[in-house]
């Protein structure tokens, strides 16, 4: 069984302390545990990077080795053509995830380029929403 890739973008390594009024106090390590629990028998490759090129490299790896992608590109959602182009090559289901409701925030956050490649988009469910996204991916993969 190919793994599910969970890919997190810039500044998400600061979860738990970064703007807790928006993102909550859950850490990225706690989110990783939540994703692994939700995946059941599926393995998870969990990544975070502040570098766009690293995220593209992980998507390329997922194209060859993964079954599904859960991606929170964070601030790169709104400007990264390279990430969009990489996601468009992925043959399996893709969930674009945002902890906050990007449509209730400032205008700059309202248009994600990644949505064009995503099978599904979840936003505003808080950190626990990662588990729901992984559960949905598992359902898609298991048929």
Image (cartoon, grey):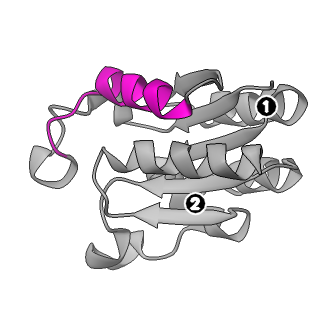
| Image side of residue 112 versus residue 19, left or right | right
- Residue drawn where x is 71% and y is 57% of the image: 81
Sooner in the amino-acid sequence: mark 2 or mark 1 = 1
Residue 16 in view in this figure: yes
| Residue on which disc 1 sits | 66
How many badges with numbers are in the image?
2
Which of the two residues, 18 or 45, is positioned nearer the viewer here? Answer: 45
Q: How many angstroms separate mark 2 from mark 1 (CA)?
A: 25 Å
As drawn, 123 above or below 62: below
Q: Would you identify the image quadrant in which residue 14 lies?
A: top left
Q: Which residues are magenta?
A: 24-39
Inspect the magenta stretch and tell me whether residue 126 lies in it.
no
Quarter of the picture holding the N terminus = top right
Q: Residues within 10 Å of mark 1 (few under 14, many from 20)?
A: many
Inspect the magenta stretch and tell me whether residue 38 lies in it.
yes
Tag 1, which secondary structure?
Answer: loop
| Residue on which disc 2 sits | 79
Which of the two residues, 42 or 94, is positioned nearer the viewer here? Answer: 42
């Amino acid at each position: 069984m190919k793994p599910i890739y969970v890919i997190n973008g810039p500044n998400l390594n600061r979860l738990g302390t970064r703007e807790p009024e928006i993102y909550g106090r859950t850490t990225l390590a706690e989110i990783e545990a939540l994703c692994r629990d939700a995946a059941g028998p599926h393995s998870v490759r969990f990544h975070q990077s502040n570098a766009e090129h690293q995220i593209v490299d992980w998507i390329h790896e997922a194209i060859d080795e993964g079954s599904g992608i859960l991606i929170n590109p964070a601030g790169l959602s709104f400007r990264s053509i390279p990430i969009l182009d990489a996601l468009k090559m992925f043959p399996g289901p893709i969930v674009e995830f945002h902890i906050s409701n990007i449509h209730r925030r400032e205008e700059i956050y309202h248009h994600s380029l990644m949505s064009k490649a995503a099978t599904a988009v979840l936003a505003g469910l808080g950190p626990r929403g990662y588990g729901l996204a992984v559960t949905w991916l598992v359902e898609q993969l298991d048929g």
